[in-house]
Image (tube, helix red, strand yellow):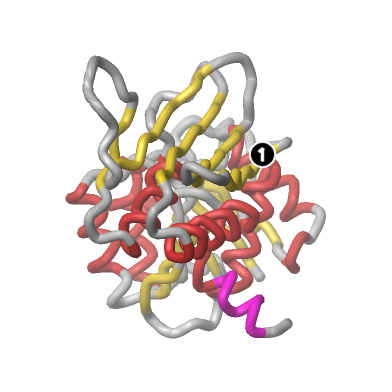
Amino acid sequence: MKILISGYAGFMGKEVKKLCLEGYKGAELVLGVDPNTDPSDSLAVRSFSEVPEDTAIDCIVDFSFHTATPALLDFAVARRIPVVLATTGHTDEELEIINKAAKNIPIFYSRNMSLGIALLIELAKITALAMPEAEIEIIESHHNRKLDAPSGTALMIADTICSVRPEAYTNSGRSGQGKRSPEEIGIHSIRMGNIVGIHEVIVGTKNQTITLKHEAHDRALFAEGGLSAAAFIVGRKVGLYDMASLVDEQASAI
């Protein structure tokens, strides 16, 4: 599986490169794209316009920045290459570009590349359905350098819960005075130290509480997820895929 890494010079790009060199999921690094790459690196170029025409690429794994998505997808669609988008913070316009591109190539898009998070989301959905009277709160914790709050993952969890609770709505960073409504889903963000990522979903009634929690110990797990997604999407028909698609396939094989 020949991989092109977008965001090659970044922290996650380096993690994906490391796994490719180890042959994880049968991956083989053929090229990296990053405007900040070292000019002396023979495996990297600064833009997609510099990618040689004869470069054989089975999948692009993107851990760059959301503003790079339009150029990336223009390149991928032109060459009919599947893409794994592991970048967060896309604008509505960029999401529209992703959906349009997915009509021409297979795209795997997720705001979190952890299989464990995908399982957490599925469990939160089941719990919200099974306990319709329960109140639900989400707490997410990350390092002090993270720019966005709430995290994209916390929003994924909330969106999934709202999909099975039509009257539900989110309240990020509750403050001030006022009684909590039964339909409210609170989202709370913690930023400190070097926390890789912790997500908790607390589901409670007056008589019992269920806490679902996922903790990432190393950012390498997201690189593993990116290459697992690449292995999943290569050879797929045109369309938009996500972690739920991967989880469903793995669950059906059990």
Q: Which residue matches tag 1?
A: 215
Q: Residues within 10 Å of mark 1 (few under 14, many from 20)?
A: some
* Position of 253 relative to 150 (above/below): below
Q: Residue furthest right?
A: 22
| Circle 1: element type | strand
Which percent across, then down, holds residue 217?
A: 72, 36
* Position of 181 relative to 100 (above/below): above
Residue closest to the eye, 121 or 77: 121
Left or right of 148? Residue 82 is right
The span picked out in magenta is: 246-252
Q: Quadrant of residue 79?
A: bottom left
Which percent across, then down, holds residue 11?
A: 60, 33
Residue closest to the eye, 51 or 148: 148
Q: Residue furthest left?
A: 93
Q: Quadrant of the N terminus?
A: bottom right
* Position of 85 relative to 241 (above/below): above
Which percent across, then down, holds residue 164?
A: 34, 64
Q: Quadrant of the C terminus?
A: bottom right
Left or right of 24? Residue 37 is left
Residue closest to the eye, 246 or 5: 246
Q: Is residue 93 magenta?
A: no
Which percent across, then down, holds residue 195?
A: 63, 25
Residue at left 64%, top 54%? 116
Our reading of the magenta stretch's main secondary structure is: helix
